[in-house]
Image (cartoon, rainbow, N blue to C red):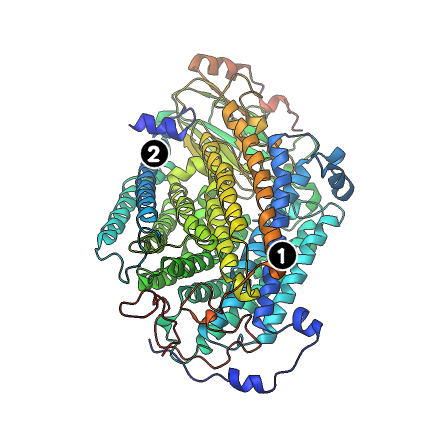
């Protein structure tokens, strides 16, 4: 039943652990919607046929006498409460309050959105990102890295539009934007988060299918919005990921990428 | 609640005595008569609605056939907007998108639903000779026209109109280098002012000018819906007006109300920073959500009138309707942040807003249920206004129900900013509200002109509109569910599976193909409005003359006047003896008993 309904709704490919719960909630809400709509429509068609002028030339001043509709209202309210308390609230709390702990070895990544690309930062083996500040911004150091910060020594050189992560391991992405509001959307991962300048917002997910996925920008960000489609998320096996990681230049080696 | 049903400050009878013939300009252009102002609002708003729809018909070309010149109007776009070879670029698309939303909401539906119908019908329905403040009423229309002209002019300035969406999110609104945004904000200030003047006037009129005997619980539901709408406008618009002026300052005076520190946007130059982009969203949606009910409540009111009249029986659950409308009015002020679930919202805040969002769905369901149940035991007449009013029920039903998965934050996670959202709110306002408004036009047209619009062409208009509306918006649910995002000038072509072989989850050929079928349906919907336009103007002179002043055999007071109602409305100040929907009263000689019948 659930799978059939998922198919009817046309939910897209799913590739993250928590995504099934997003789909579940969408499906449960649609059960409620379908039940109500079908009920309304059947009643509606019956009433139009039964009570048109020819079939019923004289209207009844009172109309419906029963209280069935009150019970239906109560049931609708009850179902909404269940969906709210049983699903939406705890699931959301899980998404925004319970981040993977260090012993789960999450892959931590920073993403800074800009018109019209995603800039991706890896912290290197120490897991700590280099400090950045506006005062350090120069032609050669567009991101304002603090070159004296020891945490930054092993950071990877920033890259554009490419994220690699190992499969079946939690990913934490901390998101911001350098210009306007963008929205970081990984459809197959059931992840959406606005990238807002002046705010650093973390999100997490655990990909469970190897493959290449598009990164969507979901918020109108300017004239190139529709073309902001070059971002790719590579979900690799652990070996492929390690091999890829080993090949990446360090930021301290001066491997400044182009951001145009 | 005992109503204040004291005598009118200047009764209709007294007014009649010094009635003088006015010249053309005073009578039709600078009029203070609520009926003329209502018609002015109506025609202006209908023109804007059609213009806003034309923008969308052009955008649909770009979505279906990206990067190809627009047929027919391509050369015009090239000449006026500098669209290269008549192709809709991202820049032109964003202008059209921002202005489609702005025009449909602020220049089309609000003025038509609230100002036009409200002006024409409310004073008549409550038995008043005019609005409480006729000159403020005229000023309201004039501010509306000025605001509309500023919006239209913005297309022709260098760089064109606003490009940051009808929501005008900062920093994008400040970052776009052209002045279209400045025009947009100034235009909005005029439109907001117009709505505030109207709202004050409606509230004063409904509270003060009800005829003797017209107690609160004898008000037609349409008047109630306008009453709640008036409060929504009065309380929700001022924060947006303030916010708009702050955003204007960000744009022209280099303040940073909505601009954070460390922005790197070359067109902005150096900014002081320290502001918050989210502050704008909160202020905008504090208006934005009540605005949704500003769009839908008057339509519900109209539909209720027409259903009562054409079922020939009282509305089922009149009191529930009234209390539901009041509850909606209150709750609509505390649901706004459900538009902002993806801005990094924590558990507590989002729990509050999704709880209020679920609660507000209950009175909406009650209203719909009452209207559905009113059909039971009826003797239904299927005329053009009734067809539109009946279609409103399932169409608004779809719009309302599809709000549920968007109202739960965790399911919104997938659906946010997709076409599912577009389909959802268009079902509410297009086959929902606009059908309600069409119903109202067909219904009250005889009172305005003394003639009926053609029933046959009304039915043609209805069936074609119904079919094409659904062919447009139904596939959008599938597109959104599949992950097609809004506001893409290329209709998501860059995200299609064809474009990116090897990537998982690209938009399938079928989902992309819907772009074309939807566009074709949209153009057909445009054609389907031609019978309406011709019918509307042709019938003024050539429509079937009405048989009596009360051609629909209705109970409410607007039909107990001469046709069209003269200045001052009633020949004799009406006195109200009963509720609004006394149809098929047992033992009565006729199947309708007007409110003023002793």
Secondary element type, mark 1: helix
Pinpoint residue B560: horizontal percent, then vertical percent. Answer: 46, 73
Give the CA distance from mark 1 to mark 2: 48 Å
Q: Is residue A187 above or below residue B377?
A: above
Q: What is the chain identity of the residue bearing mark 1?
A: B
Q: Quadrant of residue B380?
A: bottom left
Q: Is residue B297 above or below residue B503?
A: below
Secondary element type, mark 2: helix
Q: Please tell me how many numbered marks the rendered image carries.
A: 2
| Residue extending farthest right | B79
Q: Quadrant of residue B540?
A: bottom right
Q: Is residue B572 above or below residue B354?
A: below
Same subunit, tags 1 and 2:
no
Pinpoint residue B183: horizontal percent, then vertical percent. Answer: 68, 54
Whether residue A96 appears in this view of the structure is no
Q: Who's the residue at 46% across and 49% down the image? A: B432
Pinpoint residue B328: horizontal percent, then vertical percent. Answer: 39, 58
From the image, tell me which residue sits under label 2.
A27
Q: Quadrant of the C terminus of chain B?
A: bottom left
From the image, tell me which residue sits under label 1.
B537
Whether residue B358 appears in this view of the structure is yes
Task: Give the left or right position of residue A25, taking residue A72 as reference.
Answer: right
Q: Quadrant of residue A9?
A: top left
Q: Are marks 1 and 2 in contact (CB under 8 Å)?
A: no
Task: Give the left or right position of residue B317, taking residue B475 as reference.
Answer: left
Q: Quadrant of the N terminus of chain B?
A: bottom left
Residue B348: which numbered mark, if any?
Answer: none
Within 10 Å of the Cα at label 2, are there few (<14), some (14-19), or many (20+) other Cα atoms?
Answer: many
């Amino acid at each position: 039943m659930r799978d059939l309904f998922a198919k009817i709704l046309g939910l897209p490919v799913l590739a993250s652990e928590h995504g099934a719960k997003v789909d579940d909630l969408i499906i449960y809400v649609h059960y409620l919607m379908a039940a109500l709509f079908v009920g309304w429509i059947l009643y509606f068609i019956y009433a139009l046929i039964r009570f048109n002028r020819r079939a019923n030339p004289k209207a009844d001043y009172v109309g419906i006498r029963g209280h069935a509709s009150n019970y239906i209202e109560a049931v609708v309210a009850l179902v909404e409460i269940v969906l709210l308390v049983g699903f939406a609230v705890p699931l959301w709390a899980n998404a925004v309050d319970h981040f993977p702990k260090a012993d789960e070895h999450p892959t931590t990544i920073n993403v800074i959105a800009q018109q019209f690309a995603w800039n991706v930062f890896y912290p290197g083996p120490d897991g700590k990102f280099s400090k950045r500040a506006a005062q350090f911004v120069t032609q050669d150091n567009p991101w304002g890295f603090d070159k004296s910060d020891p945490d930054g020594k092993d950071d990877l050189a920033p890259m554009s539009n490419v994220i690699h992560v190992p499969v079946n391991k939690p990913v934490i992405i901390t998101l911001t934007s350098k210009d306007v509001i963008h929205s970081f959307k990984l459809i197959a991962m059931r992840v959406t988060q606005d990238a807002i300048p002046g705010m650093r917002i973390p999100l997490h997910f655990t990909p469970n299918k190897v493959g290449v996925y598009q990164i969507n920008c979901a918020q109108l960000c300017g004239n190139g919005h529709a073309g902001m489609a070059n971002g790719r998320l590579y979900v690799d096996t652990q070996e492929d990921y390690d091999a890829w990681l080993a090949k990446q230049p360090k930021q301290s080696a001066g491997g400044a990428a182009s951001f145009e | 609640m005992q109503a204040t049903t004291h005598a009118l400050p200047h009764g209709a009878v007294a007014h009649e005595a010094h009635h003088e013939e006015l010249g053309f300009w005073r009578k039709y252009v600078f009029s203070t008569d609520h009926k003329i102002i209502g018609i002015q609002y109506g025609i202006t708003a209908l023109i804007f609605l059609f213009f806003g729809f034309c923008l969308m018909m052009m955008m649909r070309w770009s979505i279906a056939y990206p990067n190809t010149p627009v047929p027919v109007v391509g050369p015009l776009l090239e000449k006026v907007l500098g669209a290269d070879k008549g192709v809709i670029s991202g820049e032109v698309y964003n202008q059209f998108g921002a202005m489609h939303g702005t025009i449909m909401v602020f220049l089309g539906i609000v003025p038509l639903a609230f100002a036009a119908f409200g002006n024409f019908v409310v004073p008549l329905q409550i038995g008043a000779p005019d609005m409480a403040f006729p000159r403020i009423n005229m000023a309201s229309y004039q501010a509306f026209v000025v605001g509309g002209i500023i919006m239209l002019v913005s297309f022709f300035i260098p760089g064109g109109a606003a490009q940051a969406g009808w929501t005008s999110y900062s920093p994008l609104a400040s970052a776009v280098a052209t002045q279209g945004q400045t025009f947009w904000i100034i235009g909005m200030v005029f439109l907001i002012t117009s709505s505030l003047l109207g709202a004050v006037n409606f509230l004063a009129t409904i509270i003060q000018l009800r005829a003797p005997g017209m107690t609160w619980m004898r008000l037609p539901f349409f008047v109630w819906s306008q009453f709640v709408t008036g409060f929504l406008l009065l309380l929700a618009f001022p924060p947006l007006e303030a916010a708009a002026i702050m955003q204007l300052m960000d744009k022209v005076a280099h303040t940073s109300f909505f601009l954070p520190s460390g922005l790197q946007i070359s067109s902005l130059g150096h900014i002081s920073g320290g502001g918050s982009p989210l502050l704008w969203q909160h202020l905008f949606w504090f208006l934005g959500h009540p605005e949704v009910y500003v769009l839908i409540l008057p339509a519900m009111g109209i539909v209720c009138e027409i259903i009562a009249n054409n079922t020939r029986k009282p509305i089922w659950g009149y009191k529930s309707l009234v209390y539901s409308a009041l509850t909606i009015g209150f709750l609509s002020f505390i649901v706004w942040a459900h538009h902002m679930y993806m801005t990094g919202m924590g558990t507590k805040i989002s729990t509050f807003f999704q709880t209020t969002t679920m609660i507000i769905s209950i009175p909406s369901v009650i209203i719909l249920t009452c209207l559905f149940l009113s059909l039971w035991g009826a003797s239904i007449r299927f005329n053009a206004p009734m067809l539109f009013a009946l279609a409103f029920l399932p169409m608004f039903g779809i719009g309302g129900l599809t709000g549920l998965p968007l109202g739960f934050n965790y399911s919104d996670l997938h659906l946010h900013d997709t076409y599912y959202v577009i389909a959802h709110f268009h079902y509410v306002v297009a086959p929902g509200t606009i059908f309600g408004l069409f119903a109202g036009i067909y219904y009250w047209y005889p009172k305005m002109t003394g003639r009926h619009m053609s029933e046959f062409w009304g039915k043609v208009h209805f069936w074609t509109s119904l079919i094409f509306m659904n062919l447009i918006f139904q596939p959008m649910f599938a597109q959104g569910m599949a992950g097609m995002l809004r506001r893409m000038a290329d209709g998501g072509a860059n995200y299609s599976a064809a474009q990116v072989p090897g990537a998982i989850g690209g938009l399938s050929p079928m989902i992309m193909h819907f772009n074309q079928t939807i566009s074709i349906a949209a153009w057909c919907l445009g054609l389907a409005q031609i019978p309406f336009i011709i019918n509307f103007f042709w019938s003024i002179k050539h429509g079937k003359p009405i048989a009596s002043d009360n051609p629909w055999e209705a109970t409410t007071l607007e039909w107990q006047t001469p046709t069209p109602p003269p200045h001052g409305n009633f020949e004799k100040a009406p006195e109200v003896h009963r509720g609004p929907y006394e149809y098929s009263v047992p033992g009565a000689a006729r199947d309708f008993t007007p409110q003023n019948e002793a």
